[in-house]
Amino acid sequence: MEFLDLINGNDEVVGKVSRSDAHNNASLTHRAVHFTLIDPVSHSVMVSRRAFSKKHDGGILCFLGEHVLSGEDYEDATQRGAKEELGIDVTKLFNVGEHVFSDENFSERIKMFLIEYRQNKPLQPDPAEIAEICWYTRAQLRTILVSTMAQYWLDNIDWTAILA
């Protein structure tokens, strides 16, 4: 069973909760991360299409994400996620935002990270998580249809400065 840290409004750990309980009670706020790759050479950002078999947003374009496991920090979860979902080791992360996403079933404090990556290295996407990897320029990002959470990051990150 996977356990997540239960946090208060100041992002302080106040307990531990199972992942299933955290996703069935919006009053149990837990931590998560979203992350993506940016290519400074082509000035593009990676967006993935979730595996069609996924319960939430299957087949939808989005950024990658991980729950922050109990005892982990946001950076550790991002590094673990990049290894598990893309097969890459990450040493340098850029935190570009934070937001609490909630609906009737869950509440997650999410930090968004960018990982510098040159597309000349092969990725090994996990087919259970990722159906397709796509690369978009800053101008193209405005034209794609993405998940609600990914749209928040598209609208609230200064992609002009990042993909200059």
Image: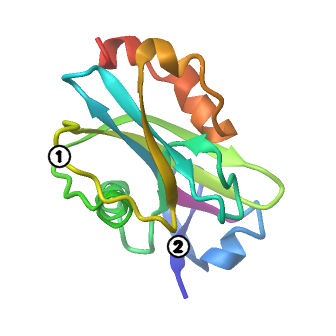
Tell me, for residue 4, which label it has, or none: 2
Across and down, in percent, residue 3 comes to: 52, 80
Q: Helix, strand or loop at disc 1?
A: loop
Task: Let me know if residue 31 is in the magenta part.
Answer: yes
Tell me, for residue 109, which label it has, or none: none
Residue 35, quarter of the rendered image: top left
Q: Nearer the viewer, residue 125 or 106?
A: 125
- The tally of labels here is 2
Across and down, in percent, residue 100 comes to: 61, 44
Q: Rounded to the nearest whole Å, what is the CA distance between mark 2 and mark 1? A: 33 Å
Query: Mark 2 belongs to which amino acid?
Result: Leu
Q: Dot 1, crowdedness within 10 Å: few (<14), some or many (≥20)? A: few
Residue at 55% from the left image edge and 88% from the top image edge? 1
**Magenta-tinted stretch:** 28-32
Residue at 48% from the left image edge and 48% from the top image edge? 132
Q: Helix, strand or loop at disc 2?
A: strand
Across and down, in percent, residue 81 comes to: 37, 61
Residue at 19% from the left image edge and 23% from the top image edge? 41
Q: Earlier in the sequence, mark 2 or mark 1?
A: 2
Is 70 left or right of 26, judged from the image as shown?
A: left
Tell me, for residue 121, which label it has, or none: 1
